[in-house]
Amino acid sequence: MNNLYIDLHVVQSVPPSCVNRDDTGSPKTAVYGGVRRARVSSQSWKHAMREMFKDHFDRRDLGVRTKKIVEYVAAEIQSLDPNKEDAEASSLAERVINAAKISTAKGEAKALFFVGAQQAKNLANLAVNTDFGAIDALKDKEKKRAEAELKSAAQAILGQDNAVDIALFGRMVADDPSLNSDASAQVAHAISTHKVETEFDYYTAVDDHAKEDNAGAGMIGMIEFNSSTLYRYATVAVHELYGQLTKNADVTAKAVVEFVRAFALSMPGGKINTFANHTPPAAVYAVIWDKRPINLVGAFENPIKSTEGYTAASIRRLGEYAQNVYKNFALKPEKAYVVALDSGLEALGAVCDWEALLEHVGADIKGVLQ
């Protein structure tokens, strides 16, 4: 099929928070356009999206990223054969996992491994139906041939029946690149549309059982934070996703809709109990086309300056920049939808509410794929 992309542009105001911090506890930042910006890494937001997926997909459609893959497959082995004791199931699981060239030590993978639920079931089935004792008893070339066949079978399992989140976000395996799975989605690091300054919250806590004449604090500490209006961008190569999801139009359309939902509405959980920064987007602009992904962050290369808030100005700037890009590079989206709390994006697509946007996206994607 021809190329098909969906681009997502989000403007979101986030109050004092520490959504994503570095190794020193400071909110992540980046220099863009010559000034320091707030930043939230793509990895942080993708994790939040995968957590939201759990509310909208059957768990069988999703993957698990874990070092405990032996334990995970062993549980599937015992589901297939309840007579297997824990030790035997674990031994079989580790043999089939090692056969796929995934390194383990002390019953765990040496690195996090992303495996789909169906893939784990299929590995368990392969383990139960493989006579490892017979393979071990073979000599030289015959043993190598049997091990090569087992490796091929195990790796074939990990190359099929991809979970939705593996198809979207990909899998990287250092032990054996042949187990890699290309991501059909890309998520940019979110950055503020304006300059930010890091601030410091000096806090104290009172000891409830301290003596009445004790004026000291039971605990003191410092938390760094900032506040910002973020520009967030993601894109899905729908044609690639379609291929990874066995060319099933219904499954692919649902995956795209849930990606849109999760990208727009999820929130990374960094220090969220401290700051309760549960804000919705101020604008979502979704573009469906066959051209190429276009990140519109250039709208904010010149940082917005304001003493009356950044959100409305950011939405207007995004709208103006997008129209300028489309006009000068002769680009015209096939379909585009806008949900916004402020004006500025109306000329870019059909204005609708959130549920309508999801319905339109699902129907458009399914229509093209069918």
Image: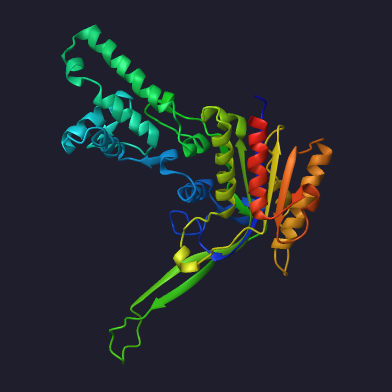
Q: Going by the picture, which residue comes out furthest to the top?
A: 141
Please state the horizontal and vertical placement of residue 53, each as a whole percent of the image.
48, 47
Q: Quadrant of residue 194?
A: bottom right
Colouring mode (rainbow / by chain / secondary structure / one colour): rainbow
Say if 249 sits above or below 300 in the image.
Answer: above
Q: Residue 270 vs residue 306: left or right?
A: left
Asked whether residue 24 appears in the rendered view, the answer is yes
Please state the horizontal and vertical placement of residue 224, each as a whole percent of the image.
49, 65
- The residue sitting at 40% across, 22% down in the picture is 156
Number of disc labels:
0
Q: Residue 88 vs residue 67: left or right?
A: left
225 and 187: which is toward the camera: 187
Q: Quadrant of the C terminus?
A: top right
- The residue sitting at 67% across, 49% down in the picture is 357
Q: Quadrant of the N terminus?
A: top right
Q: Going by the picture, which residue comes out furthest to the bottom?
A: 213
Say if 239 sits above or below 320 in the image.
Answer: above
- The residue sitting at 30% across, 40% down in the picture is 68
333 and 217: which is toward the camera: 333
Q: Residue 173 vs residue 349: left or right?
A: left
247 and 313: which is toward the camera: 247
Please state the horizontal and vertical placement of residue 2, each as a whole percent of the image.
67, 26
Please state the horizontal and vertical placement of residue 173, each as a whole percent of the image.
41, 31
Asked whether residue 116 appears in the rendered view, the answer is no
Say if 242 sits above or below 304 in the image.
Answer: above
